[in-house]
Image (tube, rainbow, N blue to C red):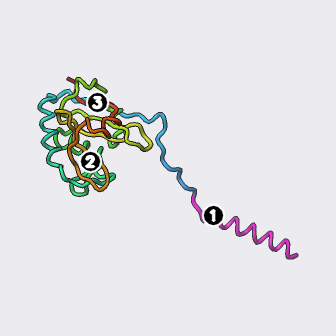
Amino acid sequence: MKPILKAAFLAAAVAVLASCGTTPRKPAHRPTAAHKVQPVRIGNIDHTEGSQELMLHSMGLIGTPYRWGGNKTEMGFDCSGMIQFVYKNALGVSLPRTARDMAAASRKIPDGKLKAGDLVFFSTGGAHKYSHVGLYIGNGEFIHAPSSGKTVQTEKLSKPFYAKNYLGAHTFFTD
């Protein structure tokens, strides 16, 4: 067999064998525009009583370290993980995992109707408009897990950074 034909045959054989040993990669999961979040409504718990439980549980987390993706006291919290943890443990209510999905599952309310236990949302950068969430505790303050190197803490809505990035108030309560 001529050397050129041998080389072509060998190259074809290698290509066929190499393609047999690989598996196609799955495409990375990317949410589509059709990504739907189910609304969450709390109608069976009085807002005042519910907010007291939420505040007790959230205040007990002050000082817990921030951890991106965290949703347990042992590992630390990110902002939405803390909110999800507090609502589940205080009221038995399951919430979506991300700030963006929490905003979609709740209903927007005017700032004048903001009560303790409601959520406050911020756009602090990143890929999504709703990138940070905190739990309103009254008197212009909220509790949240701010960022790496920090701990769960209270903050004033009037603090320039939060006032500038404030998107609004939302609630899961029906009253």
Residue 11 location, quadrant? bottom right
In this image, 63 relative to 79: left or right?
A: left
Front residue of 86/139: it is 139
Dominant secondary structure of the magenta stretch?
Answer: helix
Q: Tell whether label 1 touches label 3 (CB within 8 Å).
A: no
Residue in view at x 31 percent, y 50 percent: 147
Q: Report the label total.
A: 3
Q: Position of residue 175 (x, y in %)?
A: 20, 23
Residue 118 location, quadrant? top left
Farthest residue toward the front?
160
Farthest residue toward the right?
2
Q: Position of residue 78 (x, y in %)?
A: 30, 49
Which of pointers 3 and 1 indicates the residue nearer the eye? 3
Residue type at mark 2 is Ala
Return the mark for residue 62. Answer: none
Which residue is label 2 attached to?
Answer: 145
Task: Bin the neighbour count of mark 1 within 10 Å (Cα to Cα): few under 14, some 14-19, many 20 and up.
Answer: few
Return the mark for residue 170. Answer: 3
Gap between marks 2 and 1 measured at Cα: 49 Å
Which residue is label 1 attached to?
Answer: 20
Q: Tell whether label 2 touches label 3 (CB within 8 Å).
A: no
Label 1 residue SS:
helix
**If you read the primary sequence from the N terminus, does the residue marked by circle 3 or circle 2 appear first?**
2
Q: Position of residue 13 (x, y in %)?
A: 73, 69
In this image, 19 relative to 97: left or right?
A: right
Front residue of 125/9: it is 125
**If you read the primary sequence from the N terminus, does the residue marked by circle 2 or circle 1 appear first?**
1
Residue in view at x 80 percent, y 69 percent: 8
The residue segment tinted magenta is: 1-23
